[in-house]
Amino acid sequence: MSQSRRILFVDDERNVLDGLRRMLHPMRGQWKMEFVTRGEDALTAMQSAPYDVIISDLRMSGMDGLQLLEIVREKAPQTIRIMLSGYADQPLRTRASRCVHQFISKPCDAETLKKMVERALALYDRLHSTDLSDVLSRLTSLPVLPKAYREVMDLLNNPSCSLRRIGQVVAQDIGLSSKILQVVNNAFVTVQGQKIFDPVHAVSFLGFKAAEALILTSGVFSELVESSIRRFCVDQLQEHCMRVGTLARAICNGLHMPDDQLDVASMAGILHDAGKMILISSFPEEYWKTILESRSRYFPVYGSERLALQASHAELGGYLLDLWGLPSPIIEAVTYHHEPWLCSQSVFSVTDAVYVANWIDHQRQNSLADGWTEAMNVEYLQSFGVAEQMDSWLRSHKAALVEDLANVG
Ligand SMILES: [Fe+2]
Ligand SMILES: [Fe+2]
């Protein structure tokens, strides 16, 4: 039986806090809830013992929600930070993405809030399990957040920032721009042999979110250029990640999900195998054995990884992105990309789209870094009433990529 979670709510409107208190009364057996009206009081309260979750309003008199959660991130990085907000425009979301795990829109009913907090806690538990800490303790280091990414995020804080300007930042980094050109030209089906040679053009082609994710993966891939890992054909793996990002986005688009979800799908798809890259570079021999084991025993590679290393690339990738401060929906999609049914969502989500896109691409373009691919969980898709879409997703696997390239302006 897990002990009750400590959750702190911060809102300068007392009637909002009273509403939350009433609404969440049935949760009092599982959650130890406290309510304060000022950011300063929240900081005092967390001095005695850290909270599992802090849920703060954005706009408050005195210290606002963003200032509060930035301090919480520094003083208690293990606390899950959730922003409750009526309205958040894109520049604000970009600023908040550095310190907020999850946004919840106001007004929010008890059931939604409860589910989101429970999912955030389950994800946290999965990423901080003892099994994962075992494999982490064997790693000599984890990739650091790439410098170019920080520069791009600073640029994105400026609402008038253009893709062209971001392309120029990428172009200044020779290693990064050659990697991006290579991936763009190899991962996508070219129309009439069209190739892209200019990093600024490549970034325009990819769009903000895909470029952002590719800059992040370049941080992981830059550690992989060693002869010992050649056999895995890391380029193929990176191209697979690009295609999964594009297809996951197309799947979400076809289901009319909102734009911010499409962006999450792109980023999560591109980053979904980041953990695999870390395992390949850290344990090349051991990892090669897990792949052979997976193929010879018809056992999924994430299962072989768990047998050999106590954790899979999915959780390890989620852990790294959490460490880098990426938003929870991306971390969740990466962590559960082979087993989306473990994160109990009631509707087809981005995590499910990444699962489907990854499965399709592994079926179509198996690379040397792949093990055996298990069958698609059709009953799971049926539970959302989307199983019949599978044929059209299979057809759109290449078609969507061609269409994207045709749209290059
Ligand atoms: Fe994977
Ligand atoms: Fe994959």
Image (spheres, rainbow, N blue to C red):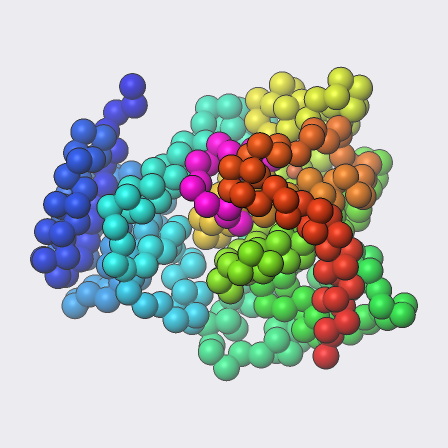
Residue 43 in the figure: left or right of residue 161: left
| Image point (48%, 32%), residue name | 342
Q: Main secondary structure of the magenta part?
A: loop
Q: Is residue 342 magenta?
A: yes
> Magenta residues?
338-350
- Residue 67, given in percent of the width and then of the height, sits at 28, 62
Residue 127 in the figure: left or right of residue 308: left
Q: Residue 43 versus residue 2: which sits nearer the camera?
A: 2
- Residue 72, given in percent of the width and then of the height, sits at 30, 50
Residue 166 appearing in the image: yes
Q: Residue 268 versus residue 44: which sits nearer the camera?
A: 268
Rendered position, 6 above or below 400: above
| Image point (25%, 25%), residue name | 3
- Residue 120, given in percent of the width and then of the height, sits at 38, 41
Residue 334 appearing in the image: no
Q: Is residue 126 magenta?
A: no
Q: Quadrant of the C terminus?
A: bottom right
- Residue 300, given in percent of the width and then of the height, sits at 68, 26
Q: Residue 185 versus residue 189: which sits nearer the camera?
A: 189
Rendered position, 291 above or below 274: above
